[in-house]
Image: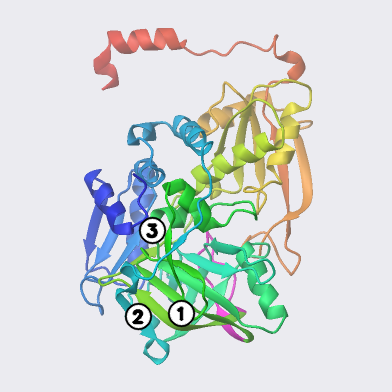
Amino acid sequence: MIQTDLREFLAAVEAGGELKTVHGAHWDKELGAVTEVLYREKVEKSPLLLFDDIPDYPKGMRCMYGMMGSPLRLALTLGMDPDLAGDRMVMLNAYREKMKDHSPVPPRMVNGGPVLENIDRDGDVDLLKFPVPIHHEDDGGRYIGTACGVITRDPDDGRINMGTYRVQVMDRNIAGSYISSGKQGRIHRDKYLAAGKPCPMAIVVGIDPACFLAARYTLSDTVPELDWAGGLAGAPIECFEGEVTGLPIPVNSEIVLEGEVSPDETVMEGPFGEWTGYYSGVANEEPLIRIKRVYYRTDPILTCAASQKPPHSHLFERCFIRSAGLMDSLQGAGIPDVKGVWCHQAGAGRTFIVVSIKQRYFGHANQVGLVASQVNPTGYVGRYMIVVDDDIDPSDIHDVIWAMGMRSDPSRDITHLTRCWSSRLDPMVTGDELYNSRVVIDACIPFERLETFPKVAQTSPELAAEVKKKFPDVYD
């Protein structure tokens, strides 16, 4: 089953042997450091970490890292057979097959639910009643919104968006958020502010797996994320109407902040350790968010996602979902015989993208790379697009680098692109012009030599199976 309740998900993770509770780690830098050190050593084999007994806070006020940071946990989130988690490409293909039957299901509005167990209003709001971490040593403050869903409404057409954008606590009831240019939440917010109006906003900072996955997914502007999450779960996401904004808010959330973004007040937000593996420059002015309601369950769980230099605790699911989205985009563009895709963890899920194809015509490889360099979900801050033949596993970095070294000619097989979509989070960008450049590397056998290229020196699958069976002790 696909859990739309974080506590049910944690029970399934514990049953799968991947839940670790840590007692006594401090909110000031230790939570993020414990998580980073673990994931750097064990990567996708690391457990989900649930921190309790956090100094200065009562037992039961918990923080969680690594929600979907392993193949097993992502399979549980997607409602897939956990046995598929052993092979990335098999799991990716199974997910895409499953999603062929996906149909968005609008939320169902209800009057009660778990997150309404406790409500702090107006003067009673205190964001630091929760153990909000300083995730990295040089962060500019405490970030309550990292593994979160920021809900906004388009003032023109009423479309509801839910995206993951960072949110910093400034005071008891004041927050600030950085949203990259071009993101739907930023577009919605800026429409209100340009008209001199406050932007209604709800921030789910204790989020369930289905909604978190939807918030991180790059969807068509026509598909609201809550509807997409309902389609994934096979049932409507139950929501209540926010008292201040009227926005739909999932009732199975752990913690929700509701308020308005000011059209004329700002705060200095940042820096923050970002997905690039770098701090996001210096503090910058961002619109102030005044929090007027806080809804939370008893003994709530703050869901966290500290980005660090790869690998880190929320990178696997990003790579997986972005890879699936790119496959959909390439096939939707009418490009034939795309066999596999992987957005590599070492490239932070964005800057090193590999696509495998069955070559069908001259220019096929370059066409694929050019399209992949621009479409969602890989057009934002992309860098290297590598195209390989279908005998190469795009998720196997050894296979990919071998293909680049042996099948590409640097003088003819590298195509440069300029003035592409970037962000101030990109450490290579300076000034106000948020462009970057990128390359497409054709690491395929030259099309005209497909029949004459040297044969690969590798044991055949038949012989490999035979020796494994004959000498099993060698492979234990």
239 left or right, relative to 48:
right
Query: For residue 243, which numbered disc appears in the image?
Result: 1
Location of residue 255 with respect to 124 vertically, above or below: above
162 left or right, relative to 371:
left
The residue that disc 3 covers is 208
Quadrant of image for the N terminus: top left
Going from N to C along the chain, the mark reached first, 3 or 2, is: 2
What residue do we see at 68% from left, 74% from top? 190
Please tell me which residue lies in front, 420 or 221: 221
Q: Main secondary structure of the magenta part?
A: loop
Q: Amino acid at mark 2?
A: Ile
How many angstroms separate mark 2 from mark 1 (CA)?
10 Å
- Report the mark closest to the observer, 3 or 1: 1
Please tell me which residue lies in front, 224 or 207: 224
Image coordinates for residue 355, horizontal then vertical, percent: 62, 33
- Report the mark closest to the observer, 3 or 2: 2
**Start and end of the magenta stretch?**
265-285
Going from N to C along the chain, the mark reached first, 2 or 1, is: 2
The answer to whether one can see residue 121 in this image is: yes
Going from N to C along the chain, the mark reached first, 3 or 1, is: 3
Location of residue 379 with respect to 204 vertically, above or below: above
Image coordinates for residue 466, horizontal then vertical, percent: 35, 7
Query: Given the current orientation, which residue lies at the most extreme bottom position?
Result: 123
The residue that disc 2 covers is 119
Image coordinates for residue 371, horizontal then vertical, percent: 72, 40
Mark 2 vs 1: CB contact within 8 A: yes
Pointer 1 local density, CA inside 10 Å: few below 14, some 14–19, many at least 20: few
Classify residue 31 by image quadrant. Answer: bottom left
Q: Secondary structure at mark 3?
A: loop
